[in-house]
Image (tube, rainbow, N blue to C red):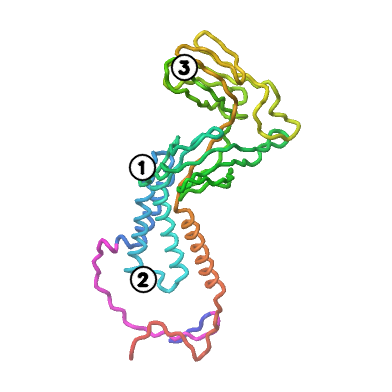
């Protein structure tokens, strides 16, 4: 039987007797490789993403990982049993890049690290961090890292609009030398895969000297007042003198305008200021160089300096995630380019299509 299609080409159709195929038993592999399983796993993954931020960190990792890895298994079994994508290399590369993206994202969340620290001017990082969040696979590697905060500069524009931070540090090298560096909000100190960034948190730090009455060593240290100018009107802190039972309350009183709103300015230490210190029912007003006698020793107020807050970030998978994402995008672009710009060949009379032919 000969028919014509819409292009006018002849199509030769030969009928053949179709015999019923014997039923094929369905196994576990066939179920896992089926399109129905793919659809179910996609629905489960969508539900997992919906409740991702409603549960704890450890649970949220696995609630995403389990359906994701089952989808990966579904894909590989479908390739092995149903030969999907065997004629589309760009689409196959796209799927493999997506698989690499999922695996890297999981590994990154299992090994990530976030932390913070605060350093006064000329204070050295001792290897200890605060506010730590980390994945269960992370192995801390900053115990031997040392660098010193040498101070910072921040420019504010009119209206107290903050510009970038320029923070000078001295990194201690393994041979004993120190390397001078400048870091900031977007220019980190990189130690292995750890990245130290300056943060928006910074402020003033009064420096004290504590001379105990007993014949012990003199202690010199600083306290970090709340961030400035974020807490402009709350520059007070309760603190305890190390090695004693004395708890003091201190407040910085600035006696000059360090935050002009009608012009640009640099973050600076106020020259005119005093420190109000309270111990019990006693109140003291100190200027640099003043000292007070307290039970157990003498407390001297040396000077006012600054402190800088840092953010520490670790995730070695980020460059590989970017590479996987770019590969997947390029592969998808090639796939659609080939699909939509493939030349359409008109059929000629000698090149007839034969459907359902059987050997004669």
Q: As displayed, is residue 2 above or below residue 77?
A: below
Which label is found at residue 328?
A: none
Number of numbered callouts drawn: 3
User: Which is closer to the viewer, label 2 or label 3?
Assistant: 3
Q: Position of residue 200 (x, y in %)?
A: 58, 36
Q: Camera-side residue: 240 or 63?
A: 240
Q: Position of residue 209 (x, y in %)?
A: 52, 22
In screen coordinates, is 193 left or right of 269? left
Residues at marks 3 and 1, CA–CA distance in whole angstroms: 41 Å
Q: Main secondary structure of the magenta part?
A: loop
Quick one: quadrant of the C terminus? bottom left
In which image quadrant can residue 252 be found? top right
Q: Camera-side residue: 11 or 215?
A: 215
Q: Earlier in the sequence, mark 3 or mark 1?
A: 1
Query: Mark 2 Cα within 10 Å, few/some/many (few <14, many 20+)?
Result: few
Task: Tell me what residue is drawn at x 49 percent, y 44 percent.
Answer: 172
Q: Position of residue 274 (x, y in %)?
A: 63, 19
Q: Earlier in the sequence, mark 2 or mark 3?
A: 2
In screen coordinates, is 274 left or right of 242? right
Which label is found at residue 59?
A: 1
Task: Identify the secondary structure beneath mark 1.
Answer: helix
Read off the residue under disc 2: 83
Task: Tell me what residue is drawn at x 50 percent, y 46 percent.
Answer: 177
Q: Camera-side residue: 305 or 74?
A: 305
Task: Tell me what residue is drawn at x 50 percent, y 16 percent.
Answer: 248
Q: Which residues are magenta?
A: 6-30
Quick one: quadrant of the N terminus? bottom left
Q: Earlier in the sequence, mark 2 or mark 1?
A: 1
Read off the residue under disc 3: 247
């Amino acid at each position: 039987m000969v028919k014509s299609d819409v292009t006018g080409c002849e199509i030769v159709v030969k009928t053949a007797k179709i015999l019923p195929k014997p039923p094929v038993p369905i196994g576990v592999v066939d179920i896992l490789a089926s399109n129905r399983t793919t659809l179910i796993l996609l629905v489960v993954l969508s539900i997992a993403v919906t409740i991702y931020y409603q549960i704890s960190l450890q649970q949220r990792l696995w609630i995403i990982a389990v359906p994701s890895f089952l989808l990966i298994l579904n894909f590989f079994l479908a390739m092995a049993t149903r030969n999907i994508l065997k004629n589309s290399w760009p689409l196959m590369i796209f799927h493999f890049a997506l698989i690499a993206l999922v695996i890297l994202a999981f590994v990154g969340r299992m090994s990530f690290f976030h932390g913070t620290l605060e350093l006064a001017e000329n204070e050295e990082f001792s290897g200890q961090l605060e506010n730590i969040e980390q994945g269960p696979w992370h192995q801390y590697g900053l115990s031997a890292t040392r660098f010193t905060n040498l101070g910072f500069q921040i420019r504010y524009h009119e209206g107290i609009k903050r510009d970038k931070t320029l923070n000078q540090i001295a990194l201690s090298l393994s041979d004993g030398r120190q390397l001078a560096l400048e870091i900031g909000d977007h220019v980190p100190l990189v130690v292995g895969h750890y990245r130290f960034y300056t943060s928006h948190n910074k402020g003033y730090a009064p420096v004290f000297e504590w001379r105990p009455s007993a014949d012990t060593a003199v202690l010199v240290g600083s306290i970090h007042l709340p961030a400035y100018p974020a807490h402009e009107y709350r520059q007070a802190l309760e603190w305890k003198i190390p090695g004693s039972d004395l708890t003091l309350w201190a407040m910085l009183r600035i006696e000059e305008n360090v935050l002009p709103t009608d012009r640009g300015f640099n973050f600076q230490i106020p020259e005119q200021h005093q420190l109000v210190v309270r111990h019990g029912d006693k109140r003291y007003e100190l200027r640099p160089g003043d000292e007070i006698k307290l039970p157990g020793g003498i407390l001297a107020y040396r000077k006012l300096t600054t402190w800088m807050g840092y953010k520490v970030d670790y995730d070695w998978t980020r460059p590989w995630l970017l590479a996987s994402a770019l590969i997947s995008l390029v592969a998808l672009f090639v796939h659609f380019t080939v699909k939509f710009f493939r030349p359409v060949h008109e059929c000629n009379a000698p090149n007839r299509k034969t459907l359902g032919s059987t050997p004669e």
